[in-house]
Amino acid sequence: MRTRTAAAEVRVGPLTRTDFVRYAGAGGDFNPIHHDDGFAASAGYPSVFGHGLLTAGILSGFVCDWLGRRNLRSYGVRYVAQVWPGDTLILSGEITGATEDGLARAELRVERESPDGERAVVLRGTATAAVHTEEEK
């Protein structure tokens, strides 16, 4: 597998309330905070927001496309902030080093870009993968 230090940035979205409801059906998480504005407002939020696992799942697809699903050995995320209807996700990754057993270590990030252009990090992640340079093939 040919690797690069940084992955090409990928944009997903804008995400909609329908995306959140579809994920709720697929994942079985019907917490009304993700689809009912009145409920979200009563909990102190300005609107419904996306499931954290929706964002983590989108990032996992990005990582598999970049590093190769069969090469992936570990993947982890840390949730930082909510994703709102209308946000576009901006996915990025960079290989930052190697583990003692020779696996590449990558740092991952998901930012959201709101409709008015404001950007903020919503998810940070890490991955390790077996990678090979062109010379090793």
Image (cartoon, grey):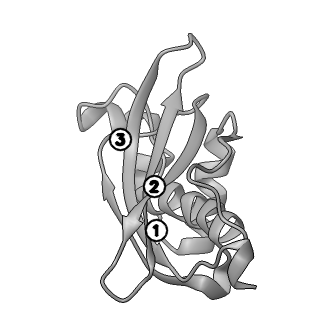
Dot 3: within a 10 Å radius of its alpha carbon, few (fewer than 14), some, or many (20 or more) residues?
some
Q: Position of residue 20 (x, y in %)?
A: 58, 51
Q: Nearer the viewer, residue 41 or 8?
A: 8
Q: Nearer the viewer, mark 2 or mark 3?
A: 2
Q: Quadrant of the C terminus?
A: bottom right
Q: Nearer the viewer, residue 40 or 110?
A: 110
Q: Residue at x 71, y 66 (%)?
A: 65
| Residue 1 shows in this picture | no
In the rendered image, the vertical position of residue 23 relative to residue 37, given as above or below? below
Q: Which residue is mark 1?
A: 29
**Residue 22 appears in which quarter of the rendering?**
bottom right
Q: Residue at x 54, y 83 (%)?
A: 130
Q: Secondary structure at mark 1?
A: loop
Spot the residue most to the front: 135
Q: Amino acid at mark 3?
A: Phe
Q: Which residue is mark 2?
A: 51
Q: Position of residue 84 (x, y in %)?
A: 49, 34
**Which circle marks residue 84 in the picture?**
none
